[in-house]
Image (cartoon, grey):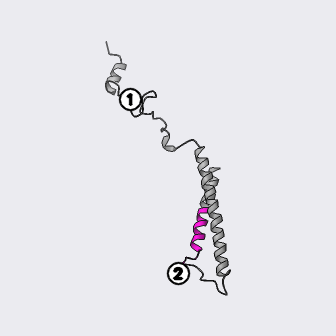
Amino acid sequence: MATVLLVIHLFIALGLVGVVLLQRSEGGALGIGGSGGAGGFLTGRGTANLLTRVTAMLAAAFFVTSILLTILARQGPGSVLDRTPAGKAPVSKPGAPAGKETPPKAGGILERLQKKTPEPK
């Protein structure tokens, strides 16, 4: 569900960028198509109204999909950063206060291995 919504969200974002770039600037120097002449699709005013309405609809859809993605993310399993990697134990003990590390056991690995192996007689 979230993947489908994310793809729709991306298409809306791309459409919004495209429609905004098609709009005529206030100065008119960067607009595409001029003020609309005999070969124009619509009149200058009609094109501006159409692009303004499409921009408003795409912006509303963008906000709705953003809110829905946020709701879906909060119901998920949580942040990837909060998870412990598989096979690794947390550093602190479960009952220990936060921020305190577990003290190392006395002796190194060599000393622990020597205690496990029986001495020859």
- Left or right, 75 with respect to 111, comes to right
Which disc, if any, is residue 51?
none
Secondary structure category for the residue under label 2: loop
- Mark 1, residue position: 102
Q: Earlier in the sequence, mark 1 or mark 2?
A: 2
Q: Position of residue 99 (x, y in %)?
A: 39, 34
Q: Amino acid at mark 2?
A: Ala
Q: Is residue 56 above or below residue 107?
A: below
Residue drawn at the location 63% of the way across and 66% of the way down: 56
* CB within 8 Å, label 1 to label 2: no
- Residue 118: say if magenta: no
Label 1 packing within 10 angstroms: few (<14), some (14-19), many (20+)? few
The span shown in magenta is 12-31
Residue flagged by tag 1: what amino acid is it? Thr
Q: Is residue 116 above or below residue 1?
A: above
Q: In the depicted view, which residue is nearer to us: 1 or 34? A: 34
**Residue 80 place in picture, x, y as percent:** 51, 44
Location of residue 18 by image quarter: bottom right
Residue position marked by numbered label 2 in the rendering = 29
Q: Is residue 102 visible?
A: yes
- Residue 35 is drawn in which quadrant? bottom right
